[in-house]
Image: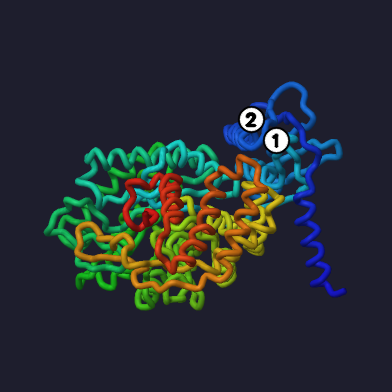
Amino acid sequence: MNIRSILSIHGVFLAMKCYAFAVGVGSIRLVLPVNPPPLAVKAAQLFTDRVTQQCEARVITSGDAPIRIYFEIKPRIGREGFRISVLSNGNVHIVGNDERGLLYGVGKLLRTAYCDDKGFHVGSWQGVSVPEKPVRGIYFATHFHNYYHDAPIENVVTYVEDLSLWGVNTLGVWFDMHHFEGFEDPQAQQMLKRLRAFLRAAKSVGMRPSLVVVANEAYNNSPQELRAVGPGRGGFYNVELCPHKAGAKDLLLKQFSEVFRTFADVGVEYIVIWPYDQGSCGCAQCAPWGSNGFLFIADPLSQLARHYFPKVQIVLSTWYFDNREWIGLSKAFRRKPAWADCILTEPGSHADDFPLHHEIPGNLPLIGFPEISMAGMYPWGGFGANPQPARFQKEWDRVKGRSEGGFRYSEGIYEDLNKVILSQFYWDAKKNALSTVKEYVSFYLSPVVAEETVKLVEILERNHHYRWWPEAPGDYNFPGTDRWWNPAKGAQPQEDPGAEAAFELAKDIDAKLPRHARQSWRWRILYLRALLDKELKRSTGHPTERAEEAFRELIDIYHASQADTPVKPPF
């Protein structure tokens, strides 16, 4: 037998061992360190909440229980890493290298345990795990009245906590100015309050709060005489400012000062400065924007950020850069600039693969920005879950040697599985996407259906494509412009091989699930996606009455009753 076969058998054995559950118990005692730090207390709360949501087991911190789970913090494991030991008497020791490591160890224990009507079962996974990539972030887009824009804040806070258990250590948000009539606009203040709540929730679970700022963005009432020259790349709302026009630079810095001051007490640790979509200026003084006007305003903007957040890391985004701009940036950053700490890009997300074949400008660390929400489907999430493990495996294999992690771009909860796949790539660059799918299913649904659900996810990915029909909801009009947009328009019905079998599989899985899993939104968005694939195939793309019911349920799950076309199921 060759070494590859031995390793393959060993991997199967470890996967089986991970889900070899101990006898269920009705109560668990958590033993925390003396004077536990805040994140240890939070980890205990999250453990308690997640267990009691799934079964009748009690979680206590004093008295007797069949098993005890000890929380400890001891350095020298590796930054943000942990060790789990399952003792012969059934007790468990979770040791974190630091507070975050302890929390991530609790997440791993939860994912490899199981709850049923017999109580809580400790899994047999044990060992040491240390993250490879330092930046394991997520970016919440708060626009179009999507989930992050309109869902109750407490729902989003719970979701942030869920992500932390997978090792996500950074949350980014963006205060999009173009909607508002200035900083004092009541709706602007309401949005700032919401974003502050998200970042405070992130900080409570050890995430690094982060802000995205578009370098020359402005409010809807920006001075006409200071406005930038469009049309830009991607979104452009004709309210952006040209930083070279007299007074525009000062106005930009004044606007950002107001925003930074609002978040000063949160303790922002990353500022991501953005070039396009929206943003940019095409005037003679600014062009080419990415290596000229953009840098002209990004430098003083980074200095302003450090005034409010002295230890902040400045991330320079290169989103939508072309080769000319990459070459210009390389010349500008022949030496590492004092004002930039990282470069954000996602090789392969556009036509240009410059970062894969050249030295990174300034020899700066490279952070990715994978798009997990929009590609190949419109409305985004409109047909349920959009799992794409094969796609992300292929993309990650190309960039993992150069990447220091990244911020996943998220439009909602329908791509929850995609978030988790990327989070585990960042934790362990060699981890296979389908093994993460299995771990996800075992945690949130049941290990009993893990293999079947992996098959379901593979079929759903094969049938991931644009859908459109003549009476579908209309195109989206970018506010303040005459541009209409519908990337799905004209898409032809696809064969969707296996869609009928996938829905039968989904029904079989549904019958095996415990009640909490069957009713969970994570399962429902997968189930409804399988249902819609089957229904739309049967009707050659036109919604049926059953499909309409599925769309209504998705709207309820997403809190999307007021959503704009790009993020609202097409009911």
Q: Dot 1 corresponds to which residue?
A: 71
Q: Nearer the viewer, residue 551 or 433?
A: 551
Residue at x 32%, y 66% (from the top left corner): 486
x, y (%) of residue 442?
A: 67, 50
Label at residue 36? 2
Q: Position of residue 417 (x, y in %)?
A: 55, 55
In the image, farthest residue toward the left: 225
Residue 106 appears anywhere in the view: yes
Q: Position of residue 449 (x, y in %)?
A: 68, 53
Instruction: Write the residue at 20% across / 73% down.
Output: 284
Of marks 2 and 1, which one's residue comes earlier in the chain?
Answer: 2
Q: Choose top left, top right, bottom left or bottom right for residue 345.
A: bottom left
Instruction: Tell me, yes or no, whether the two marked residues, 2 and 1, touch with CB atoms within 8 Å.
Output: yes
On the rendered image, what quadrant is the N terminus found in?
Answer: bottom right
Name which residue type carries label 2: Pro
In the image, what residue type sits under mark 1? Phe
* Residue 132 shows in this picture: no
